Image: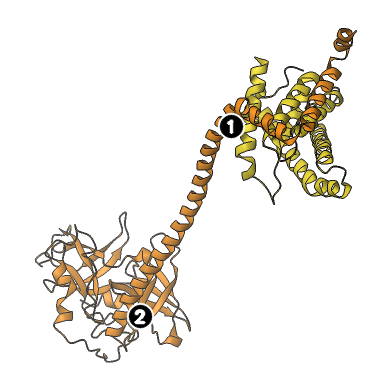
Chain colours: A orange, B yellow
Amino acid sequence: MFRLLFARRADWAALTIACVLSVTLMLLDRGQQARAAWFLQHTVLAPVDAVVGWVDAGVGVYWENQKLKKRLAQVQIEADATRSERLENARLRRLLALSQENPSDLTAARVTSRSLDRLGGSLTIDEGSREGILPNGAVITPEGLVGRIERVAPHEARVLTLLHRDCAVAVRVGRSRVDGVLQWEFGENPVLSLLYVSSQEDVKPGDWVFTSGLGGIFPEGVRVGTVTRVGIAENGLMKDVQVKPAVNFRSLEEVLVSLRAGAGRGPRMLPLESSEPDSAAAPASAPAAVAAPAPVTKRPAVVVTPPPVPAPSESTESGDGQ
Amino acid sequence: MKGLRDALVLLVVLILQATVVHRIEIAGVRPDLLVAFVVYFGWMRGPIPGVIGGFTVGLLQDIDAPGPLGLNALAKTVVSFIVAKAGFRVHRSNVGVRFVLFLTAMLVHDLIYFGFYTSGDVGGLVRQFVFVALPSALYTTVLVVLLLATVEATSRTLLLTDEG
């Protein structure tokens, strides 16, 4: 009869047996329950516990790894910010030093925007006529010449950099005192070219180039760049000289602006922090002349106010027979 | 073969319950994957395997549980049996049916569990039910429904649906 009942109602029978077992276990006293639990734990559950423990350690390591990765990323961001601030601090210190060398002549400004063109060519700074900035004022950094002020608004000004075709600069080669005009030339590979240098003149790669003050716009003795290539022009009369600017225009953030538009004695330049711009352009013999260029070291660091010069156009500078 | 696969799935669920669940708790609410497994197992396999599975899993859980030995076994046995009987005719792949069945089954399980646990204290039972059972059942149900959908989308062999 039981067999028949079990066959017909096997599911109910299973339920009943399981429930009875469960309730029996529940009705055991605490000591018996503890012994039963201990038995089950050390027989049935032990292998499962071992696997669980092993996986838990792995999962724990994975979880901790994820947390540490997040923390590392945060620390990396903080470190980057600190590094950026340190670099900014160093830049500002150099600007300040340069400004203190020429207290009445320079004012600091921050670059607020750059030319939309891929090649660059102009910048906007956050200082203007209210701060005493005049058109054609020289714009420099501790590394060298940036360009000149083109237009001035009350609280901002537009700067034409050396990489603009309207910003030609009268320059002089530091070693051989050869004069020329530096101008950006558009082409397949845009470069700064030193124009009007006779094929007989002494210009070599690695020579440093400074402003000569002859154009009437830029003050004398401001570092501009280094000669990177010297060749002979097609007509055979002139040298084809290429110059790499001392300033990295892509990373400009702060500049100093000369408050005295026009030529005259330029600000006393600080020595470069490294033998930039690059080892190919500046051979081992060059840097000594870089840190102390002839026009700078031979003359006292006194700002000489030039006689009033009518603001000339750039075509005047590049075409006035320098 | 079927038993081996069931055992492997149970082992995976035990491992997940022991290693992952406490790391994904939300405001102190943890999912109970073992109840979900018992419900699913009973639903897919039928009453007798469901009863055996429910009792076994419950007993394993009882070993570490603070309550009396056998309480989880009883609750899970009963729930698995009810689900196996009630879910026999329902559409198993419907998400809404799954949600309702899992939620109801887990609430019934907790009702039995906390009913015994609180020993007739209705206030305590209501508190446990509202603040522990209901959030946990909801969390578990949502998790299991999503998990099943994910498993279905990747591999049907992991589902226990080919027998039943």
Relative to residue A80, is residue B126 depicted above or below? above
Q: Residue A248: where, in percent of width, then height?
A: 32, 65
Please say whether residue B91 is visible from this viewpoint: no
The residue tagged 1 is A49
Closer to us: mark 1 or mark 2? 1
The quarter of the image holding the C terminus of chain A is bottom left
Mark 1 vs 2, N-terminal side: 1
User: Residue at (90%, 7%) from the top-left corner?
Assistant: A1
Mark 1 and mark 2, same subunit?
yes
Give the image quarter of residue B100.
Answer: top right
Relative to residue B143, is residue A152 depicted above or below? below
Please say whether residue B9 is visible from this viewpoint: yes
The residue tagged 2 is A257
Amino acid type indicated by mark 1: Asp
Relative to residue B149, is residue A291 depicted above or below? below
Relative to residue A200, is residue A234 depicted above or below? above
Give the image quarter of residue B23.
Answer: top right
Q: Residue A292: where, in percent of width, then height?
A: 16, 75
In the rendered structure, the residue with mark 1 lies on which chain?
A
User: Residue at (11%, 71%) from the top-left corner?
Assistant: A176
In the rendered structure, the residue with mark 2 lies on which chain?
A
